[in-house]
Image: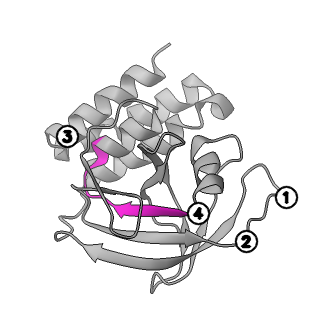
Amino acid sequence: MIIEGLLTTTSADGSPHVAPMGPVVNQSLDQWLLRPFQTSTTFANLRRHSSCIFHVMDDVLPIVQAALSLPVDVSFEPAASGGWVIQSACHWYCLETGQWDLSQPRSQVPARVITSKVQRPFWGWNRAKHAVLEATILATRIHLTGHDAVRQELDRLDSAVLKTGGPRETAAWQLLREFVSP
């Protein structure tokens, strides 16, 4: 199963780096497989520092911001085990990476949970949040599918955001719309 969220790694200058990540996990969340592209900042950071923190979020706006390489509107605190915790996350998992498989452009590395914490209850997702997440994934693949295909999908998902979204989903949707405009 793939779980979507935000991953924080430590940059070369010691600052937090935030990226969307969809690791493969098992149901009990004790087996993790991270799959960063070898050209990504996340990959470089993980090769330099073998630990990271995966965050379960119920706010789509920072996920969209990170996916579109925009400044991410979150606050951080240093984790006792190293790395950076997003304060608004529902819960997080500090992970230690293992042996890398670099045979493909999208590398793979198993990770084990060092520590985790539930910071607050998971509020949940509605149709708007799901639509925004799906549109975000499509937007990150725009170089493969083209602007027209992504715009068509956004048009299809538009009513879910307009009918069930709140201010954060609407702001995220606007960012996506601007990103896919020619």
Tags 2 and 4 touching, CB below 8 Å:
no
Q: Secondary structure at mark 1?
A: loop
Residue sitting nearer the eye, 11 or 180: 11
Does 53 appear in magenta? yes
Per the rendering, the mark at residue 168 is 3
Res 33 → quadrant: bottom right
Instruction: Work out how far the residue at label 2 is from the one at label 1, CA to CA, in angstroms.
Output: 12 Å
Tags 3 and 4 touching, CB below 8 Å:
no
Task: Determine whether 73 is above or below 99 in the image.
Answer: above
Task: Determine whether 58 is above or below 60 in the image.
Answer: below
Does 59 appear in magenta? yes
The residues colored magenta run: 51-61
The outermost residue toward the right is 103
Q: Position of residue 154 (x, y in %)?
A: 42, 34
Q: Name the residue type under label 2.
A: Gln
For disc 4, the neighbor class at 10 Å (few under 14, some 14 to 19, many from 20) is: some
Measuring 62% from the left and 53% from the top, which residue is drawn there? 48
Task: Determine whether 177 is above or below 64 in the image.
Answer: above
Q: Name the residue type under label 3.
A: Arg
Pointer 2 or 3: first along the chain: 2
Residue, disc 1: 103
Q: Is residue 43 left or right of residue 121?
A: right
For disc 3, the neighbor class at 10 Å (few under 14, some 14 to 19, many from 20) is: some
Q: Secondary structure at mark 2?
A: loop
Q: Position of residue 39 (x, y in %)?
A: 69, 40
Q: Secondary structure at mark 4?
A: loop
Pointer 2 or 4: first along the chain: 4
